[in-house]
Image: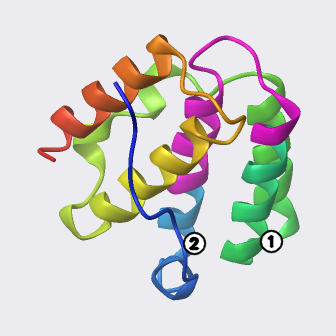
Amino acid sequence: MVVRGRGLGSTAPMTRLDDAAKRNLLKFVCSFVWTDLKVQQEERDLVMRIAGRLGIGEEDMKKVRGWLERPPAPEEVDPTDVPPAHRQLFLEAAREVFRADGKVAPAEADQYALFRDLMGG
């Protein structure tokens, strides 16, 4: 399966998220980089760019760094908890993460499809 999409592009939709939604998006993004059980440097760099675009504070940045060292707990990243208004943005973030290292592993493609399906996409 090939994961296609236009990517996150404009930061405008991301900056309209409240702090809790930004934290939730980053938690999902960090969980995505762990899909193949290895965090590649390109994935780490992408997560940090997304965090920068979101304009999060230092406390949330510490959480992101922690999630890059150890993935968020599975019960903390339930796709059905993503509000409908945020689902497209979360899907775009997933696409971008899964393509970050230039290849989409089968496990990543499967994870994306499951994530999309659980969110009703």
Q: Is residue 30 above or below residue 85?
A: above
Residue at image point 54% right, 17% down = 105
- Percent position of residue 45, x then y: 84, 49
Q: Main secondary structure of the magenta part?
A: helix
Q: Nearer the viewer, residue 67 or 10?
A: 10
Q: Nearer the viewer, residue 100 or 94?
A: 100
Q: Which mark is residue 19?
A: 2
Disc 1 and disc 2: Cα gap in Å?
Answer: 9 Å
Q: Secondary structure at mark 2?
A: helix
Q: Is residue 3 above or below residue 9?
A: above
Disc 2 crowd, CA 10 A, few/some/many (<14, 14-19, 20+): some
Amino acid at circle 1: Gly
Residue at image point 59% right, 43% down = 97
Q: How is the image coloured?
A: rainbow
Q: Nearer the viewer, residue 102 or 94?
A: 102
Quadrant of residue 34 within the rendered picture:
top right
* Quadrant for the N terminus in the image: top left
Q: Is residue 31 magenta?
A: yes
Tell me, yes or no, whether the two marked residues, 1 and 2, touch with CB atoms within 8 Å.
yes
- Percent position of residue 22, x then y: 56, 65
Q: Which residues are magenta?
A: 24-43
Q: Secondary structure at mark 1?
A: loop
Q: Which mark is residue 119?
A: none
Q: Nearer the viewer, residue 38 or 101?
A: 101
Q: Is residue 22 above or below residue 43?
A: below
**Badge 1 or badge 2: first in the primary sequence:** 2
Quadrant of residue 36 within the rendered picture:
top right
Residue annotated with mark 1: 57
Quadrant of residue 79 within the rendered picture:
top left
